[in-house]
Image (cartoon, rainbow, N blue to C red):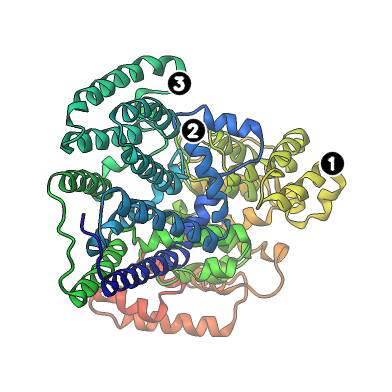
Amino acid sequence: MYRYNSYSEKKTARIVSCVSGLLFCIFCFTYLSVSYRYLLNMAEDLSLFVYNYSFFLDKASQPGGIMLYIACFFTQFLYYPWLGALIITILLQSIQWLTHKSFDFNKKYLIFSYIPSFLLLIIATNVGRSFYLMNYVEYIFTSILGMLFILLSYYFFRKIENPSKRFITLCWLFPLLFYGISGSIAIYFFVLILISSTCSIHYRKRTFTYLLCLVLYSLFFFVSVHFIYPHSSYEQVLFGIHPVIPFWQSWMNLLPHLFLLFFFLFFVIKQRLFPFENRIKSYTKWTYTNLIGLLLLCMITASLSNSSIDFRYEMIIDRSIQEGNFDRALRVGKRAPYPTREMTVLRNFALVLSGKSGEQMFEYAQNFGTDGLFLDYIEGKPAHPEGAIIYFYLGAKHLAVNWADNEYFQNRSSFRIQRNFVLMAITNGHWDVAKKISSDLKNTWFHHDFAEKLYKLSLDTTLLSNDTLLANIKKRLSNNYYPMPSKGKYTEFLNHFYHDNLSNKVAYDYYMMATLLNKNPSRFVVGAKRYSTFYKGPLPKHYAEAMVLYNSLYKETLLSVSPDIKKKFNQFLKLKAEQNNSASAKNIMRRSYGNTYWWYYMYK
């Protein structure tokens, strides 16, 4: 390998290396902490790290459990996105350095050593709604830490010159990698060793020994899986905590994994058989080539990662609701013409909690009718974690508990799930469950204050009446049993629930939203007569619009509305009558009245 012989060459190489590293760190940190801050927040929310021995045993008993435990430890720092982004940036920069050292890259080809780090960044951020359904949301760190461990092992393994010592090291290192990280990564490491030794002139005679070792370990894997992990399938043991299987469903999601595999295989063979000529002939050309290459990698990373704006909006709304920031939840994606159903459900939930459903409901696209008020429940299969809390705030106690008792959620260790459980336990009077969960959450860094508050409530039940949120929820809880509603049947459920719980303000809001979404003015009027029971002042905008529409349809005035609303409705009817082309009328009317109930009633 060529060594730098001149002072100017060393100085140039040092400057380019420092500038490239700085640019990469700035891009990676900004990319994660700004564009994907809510993804990091969500990963922390769907994970949990507890400082006790039982938690360690629970993680370590799984395939790849040691790495999973370490990944859980780092995931907790995503509570502050900037801190999580900083940790990930440092780890990815370390991977770049190890790649550079392990594969004999000289400074002339510095840009190639950044490719694995960029690919891992794509893998960490290229997720969609399946993120809620992953068994291990800590994959953001397991992939990075797994690669870091493999490169570190490969780097030190290559430092061993004696063939006998290499073989002995391999015998104990491979089981450590296999049972500590998971089979797929360990086998990947072993393949690198085989190719490296096969292509090496000095160690080619040992190739058969390495190959025999691989065969023996493969047999050992199929035998030991029944004794070490008797409750895990071969697939779970082989792939462990690394989410390779879900990515096979999409070639676009699989591409970063294939590129990562191709990168290491190619450069192991290339550097062993045909080493790069590292002599630098033009400092200027070399400098610009590396910097431009780095910028191109940044652009490719941004284009290949998940850029679904709807999913990003959904995460922001979800997080904002949890933080009680309803203004932000209602502000995000306000102009999106085709929001996803999950996004619509969460936004309508925020409208109800903020008391603004009657005023702002039709300022957003409502494309799902009453199906846009609730999430679907699938028995025994993964579901959106927020479904339980929606029914809980509504007061449908049994539905909330059934959702939270989903087998999928029972097998998850997550702060959100634990929080939902403890809130339901406290309001239902299950103080022993609340005390146990609160005690576990006290052994965390970032949720200690929340756990302390709940623990005090479990010790002194009289404090529950002082907590406005929990006290109000407790008053709304219904002991009646209702079958879990499904798609197309939410209207029927809300009718029954509202009439059984006439003093429930949240149920009233949901009922009123359902009547408007169903375009049922007669049912709306029945509910509108009870508006003063829950709110003071005149009818809000959309309720007043619905009342004017009812008066026009049935020639009957039940509740008075503002003269301005009546005037605006007459203008709406006049403009509608002027439209001769039915194909263009919908868009023309949308421009002036798209945020009114009238437009929804006439054109949706």
Judging by the rendered image, the residue that carries numbered circle 3 is 229
Q: Is residue 122 left or right of residue 474?
A: left
Q: Tag 3: residue type?
A: Tyr
Judging by the rendered image, the residue that carries numbered circle 1 is 459
Q: Do the residues labelled 3 and 1 touch (CB within 8 Å)?
A: no
**Could you say where residue 582 lies in the image, as x and y percent from the top left?**
25, 73
Q: Is mark 1 on a helix, strand or loop?
A: helix
**Could you say where residue 419 lies in the image, as x and y percent from the top left?**
64, 45
Q: How far apart are marks 3 and 2 (CA)?
A: 11 Å
Please report the residue visible at 56 percent of the width from the left and 62 percent of the height from the top. Answer: 320
Front of the two marks 2 and 1: 2
Pick whichever of labels 2 and 1 is earlier in the sequence.
Answer: 2
Is residue 109 visible in this depiction of the protein?
A: yes
Q: Is residue 260 left or right of residue 322?
A: left
Pick whichever of labels 3 and 1 is earlier in the sequence.
Answer: 3
Q: Quadrant of residue 122?
A: bottom left
Relative to the observer, which residue lies in front, 486 or 201?
A: 201
Residue at the extreme left of the image, as rendered: 274
Please report the residue visible at 46 percent of the width from the left and 68 percent of the height from the top. Answer: 34
Relative to the observer, which residue lies in front, 306 or 403?
A: 306
Judging by the rendered image, the residue that carries numbered circle 2 is 65
Q: Tag 1: residue type?
A: Leu
Q: How far apart are marks 3 and 1 (CA)?
A: 40 Å
Q: Are marks 2 and 1 in contact (CB under 8 Å)?
A: no
Q: Is mark 3 on a helix, strand or loop?
A: loop
Image quadrant where one finds the C terminus: bottom left
Q: In this view, does 81 lie to the left or right of 104?
A: right
Relative to the observer, which residue lies in front, 334 or 270?
A: 270
Q: Are marks 3 and 2 in contact (CB under 8 Å)?
A: no
Q: Tag 2: residue type?
A: Gly
**Could you say where residue 300 lies in the image, as x and y percent from the top left?**
26, 63
Front of the two marks 3 and 1: 3
